[in-house]
């Protein structure tokens, strides 16, 4: 699924109106019907009070149309208009007249703070004040209205985008943005809904299909692409009946140090579980018994050192090499890593954790990385690679430049993990807060490594690995909850994540 710009959405509306021979108000009616269906499905006729706050533009028109439908179906609705200017959109005016036909009591015209209604914590607030076309922060009493609504304990829902939140640029006034518990966004998601800096303004969202012209959308160059089940299915490579382990490559994972053997253990096990044909762990001697005992399927090469990696000189030609989990930053380890990077010309690399920190200290190494090497930083590690950013949009642009300059793929770990490959931006939508736990990133590095080993190219392996990782975490959290989920549970459910790819029912198979 594509993430589109505001201008692309406006053009999609125009093309849809032309190709489907509609009026603009017909498209608004379609959007409102989808919102009503969402309410009706979730509330099932509940008498809970619903307060719909409308602006005087098209987003307000959506709110008026939704309010009319809710009234006609017997819901307990109060509709308000923030009457802060004489300017009105034509479709807003049309829907104002239509709602007056079904209710003489609504909408209520608000003109100042004195009109702010009393709302109980059991009620629902619907924000239809401002849409994606907003170009400056709300001001005056309308800003105070947003602040008032934000302070209330009622459930808050935004139509298309929370008022005051720009679709593709940073917020100018944080006190003038509606804090939605949930957003109903139209047709395609907005970039703002995925970014950490906007987490307080829309915790979750649903995408409502309003029938915009599919051909037009397919032709657009997106701001980003969402990786979901459909995209993952298209990446998946089925296995040949007569395949053997040699067909699925040999992964080499290098890492571990005294007290951090767990990290390389998790990565190694994940590479095996995701399907690599052969997996070898290169570790210090102190980890030998741990790896051999906990992962009998893995082979082990030990360093001459008891506690750290001091040389990286594989005695075979692996299909892919991952470096970093638990590696540590001892000077001898850093020297060995630098020497290896300078000598390795062709073997695909996955660089994680301390390997990234080493590169941050000597950025000349970036020029020596094989093309399409995969870097998997968390935000702190990313900052050491690309420098400070002003906001999340700036972070994306800096990472694009870094990716282009160094010809690498950058995976930014976190909620809505982002993968940047040159100018291309991909966003993973699954996963959950329970995955914010020690070792989760090591598992991800191992999974990506195991996929490259099997013949997925670097971008495919990164996208597919992130999706499977999130899916396995979601399956694990479905029976463990968020707090009890640990990295090993993600590994335990990699097989279930593969099965879930092509299952038609909604009930995941889980492994206890």
Image (cartoon, rainbow, N blue to C red):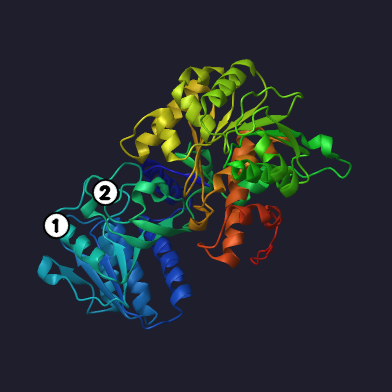
- In the rendered image of this protein, does residue 351 appear above or below residue 214? above
* Residue 236 makes an appearance in the image: no
In terms of image quadrants, where is residue 204?
bottom left
* Residue 191 makes an appearance in the image: yes
Nearer the camera: disc 2 or disc 1: 2
Q: Residue at x 39, y 65 (%)?
A: 32
Q: Which residue is drawn at 83% across and 39% down?
A: 245
Question: Quick one: label 2, few (<14), some, or many (20+) residues within 10 Å?
Answer: some
Q: What element carries label 1?
A: loop
**Side (left or right) of 312 relative to 72:** right
Q: Where residue 60 sits: x, y (%)?
A: 28, 61
Q: Where residue 1 sits: x, y (%)?
A: 53, 47
Q: Disc 2 designates what residue?
A: 134
Instruction: Tell which residue pokes out farthest to the right in this image.
Output: 242
**Side (left or right) of 98 relative to 448:** left
- In the rendered image of this protein, does residue 253 appear above or below residue 407? below
In terms of image quadrants, where is residue 348?
top right
Q: Is mark 2 on a helix, strand or loop?
A: loop
Q: Where residue 65 sits: x, y (%)?
A: 34, 67
Q: Where residue 149 sits: x, y (%)?
A: 24, 66
Q: Disc 1 designates what residue?
A: 86
In terms of image quadrants, where is residue 260?
top right
Question: Quick one: label 1, few (<14), some, or many (20+) residues within 10 Å?
Answer: few
How many numbered marks does the figure carry?
2
Q: Which of marks 2 and 1 is nearer the N terminus?
A: 1
Q: Residue at x 42, y 48 (%)?
A: 194
Q: Nearer the viewer, residue 431 or 171?
A: 431
**Side (left or right) of 451 relative to 249:** left
Q: Classify the position of the C terminus by image quarter.
A: bottom right
């Amino acid at each position: 699924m594509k993430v589109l710009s505001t201008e692309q959405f406006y053009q999609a509306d125009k093309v849809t109106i032309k190709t489907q021979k509609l009026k603009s108000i017909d498209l608004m009616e379609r959007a409102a019907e989808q919102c009503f269906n969402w309410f009706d499905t979730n509330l099932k006729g509940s008498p809970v009070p619903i307060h719909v706050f409308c602006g005087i533009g098209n987003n307000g028109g959506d709110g008026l149309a939704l309010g009319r439908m809710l009234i006609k179906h017997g819901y307990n609705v109060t509709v308000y208009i923030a009457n802060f200017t004489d300017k009105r959109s034509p479709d807003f005016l049309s829907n104002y007249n239509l709602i007056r036909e079904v209710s003489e009591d609504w909408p209520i015209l608000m003109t100042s703070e004195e009109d702010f209604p009393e709302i109980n914590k059991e009620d629902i607030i619907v924000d239809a004040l401002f849409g994606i076309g907003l170009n400056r922060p709300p001001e005056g009493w309308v800003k105070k209205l947003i602040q008032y609504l934000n302070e209330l304990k009622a459930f808050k829902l935004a139509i298309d985008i929370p008022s005051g939140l720009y679709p593709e640029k940073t917020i100018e006034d944080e006190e003038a943005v509606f804090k939605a518990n949930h957003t109903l966004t139209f047709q395609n998601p907005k970039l703002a809904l995925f970014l950490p800096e906007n987490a307080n303004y829309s915790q979750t969202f649903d995408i409502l299909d309003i029938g915009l012209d599919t051909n037009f959308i397919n032709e657009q160059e997106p701001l980003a692409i969402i990786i979901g089940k459909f995209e993952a299915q298209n990446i998946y490579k089925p296995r040949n009946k007569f395949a053997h382990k040699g067909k699925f490559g040999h992964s080499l994972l290098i890492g571990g140090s005294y007290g951090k053997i767990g990290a390389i253990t998790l990565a190694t096990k994940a590479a095996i579980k995701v399907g690599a044909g052969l997996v070898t762990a290169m570790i210090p001697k102190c980890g030998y018994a741990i790896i051999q005992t906990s992962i009998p399927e893995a082979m082990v090469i030990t360093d001459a050192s008891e506690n750290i990696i001091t040389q990286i000189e594989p005695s075979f030609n692996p299909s892919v090499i991952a470096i970093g989990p638990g590696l540590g930053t001892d000077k001898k380890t850093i020297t060995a890593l630098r020497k290896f990077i300078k000598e390795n010309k062709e073997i695909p690399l996955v660089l994680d954790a301390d390997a990234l920190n080493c590169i941050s200290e000597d950025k000349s190494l970036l020029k020596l990385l094989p093309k399409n090497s995969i870097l998997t930083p968390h935000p702190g590690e990313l900052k050491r690679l690309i420098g400070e950013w002003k906001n999340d949009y700036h972070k994306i642009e800096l990472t694009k430049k870094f990716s282009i300059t160094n010809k690498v793929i950058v995976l930014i770990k976190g909620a809505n993990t982002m993968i940047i490959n040159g100018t291309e931006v991909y966003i993973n939508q699954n996963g959950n807060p329970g995955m914010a736990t020690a070792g989760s990133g090591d598992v991800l590095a191992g999974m990506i490594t195991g996929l490259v080993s099997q013949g997925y190219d670097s971008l495919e392996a990164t996208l597919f690995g992130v999706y499977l990782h999130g899916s396995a975490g979601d399956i694990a959290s479905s029976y463990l909850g968020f707090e009890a989920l640990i990295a090993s549970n993600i590994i335990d459910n990699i097989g279930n994540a593969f099965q879930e790819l092509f299952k038609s029912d909604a009930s995941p198979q889980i492994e206890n």
